[in-house]
Amino acid sequence: MPRAVTHCPDCGQRVTPFAAGCAVCGADLEAARKARAARSAKLSFELPRAPRFGGGTTGRIDWVHIAVAVLVALAIPPVGLLLGLYWASRRHRDGETAMTVAMLAATALAAAALLAPVWFWSHLLHI
């Protein structure tokens, strides 16, 4: 939102932000406000965004995120479990069904990697 016109563009007299015209010279302040809004809209720009690999629709697959999730799930299962759940919730909120399922699969892989030593030793020792 552009700043309010506080001074008359013609005579420089101080004006209220709600005035339709200057009390001294009668200049049209509404036109000055519209011109200022047009200049600020022309000067405004959108910040560049980081590129996204896939995403945005329900059918697109982001292979980079899947690879990272699987690697973290196998290398550091507790972190992979938390990261997979976090990414699954983010993708679910964005409506990306395929990526939600992929992140839940990576989370299940992390849970399996976390529980595999317990299963192995319990069967080895017949407990």
Image: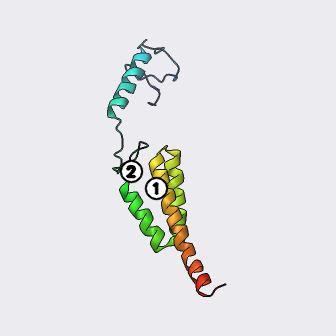
22 or 76: which is nearer to us? 76
Residue lying at the far bottom in this picture: please name it. 125
Residue lying at the far right in this picture: please name it. 127
Q: Earlier in the sequence, mark 2 or mark 1?
A: 2
Residue flagged by tag 1: what amino acid is it? Ala
Report helix, strand or loop for mark 1. helix
Alpha-carbon distance for marks 2 and 1?
9 Å
The quarter of the picture where residue 28 lies is: top left
Q: Which mark is residue 61?
A: 2
For the rendered model, the colour scheme is rainbow
Residue flagged by tag 2: what amino acid is it? Ile
**CB within 8 Å, label 2 to label 1:** yes
Counting every numbered tag in the picture gives 2
What residue is shown at x 52% (from left), y 72% (from top)?
Answer: 113
What residue is shown at x 41% (from left), y 64% (from top)?
Answer: 68
Residue lying at the far top in this picture: please name it. 26
Q: Position of residue 79 (x, y in %)?
A: 52, 68
Report helix, strand or loop for mark 2. loop
45 or 23: which is nearer to us? 45
13 or 59: which is nearer to us? 59
What residue is shown at x 57% (from left), y 74% (from top)?
Answer: 115
| CA neighbours of label 1 inside 10 A, class few (<14), some (14 to 19), many (20+) | many
| CA neighbours of label 2 inside 10 A, class few (<14), some (14 to 19), many (20+) | some
Quadrant for the C terminus in the image: bottom right
In the rendered view, would you say 6 is above or below 75?
above
Q: Which mark is residue 102?
A: 1
In the rendered view, would you say 46 is above or below 23?
below
Q: Which mark is residue 24?
A: none
Q: Position of residue 73 (x, y in %)?
A: 48, 68
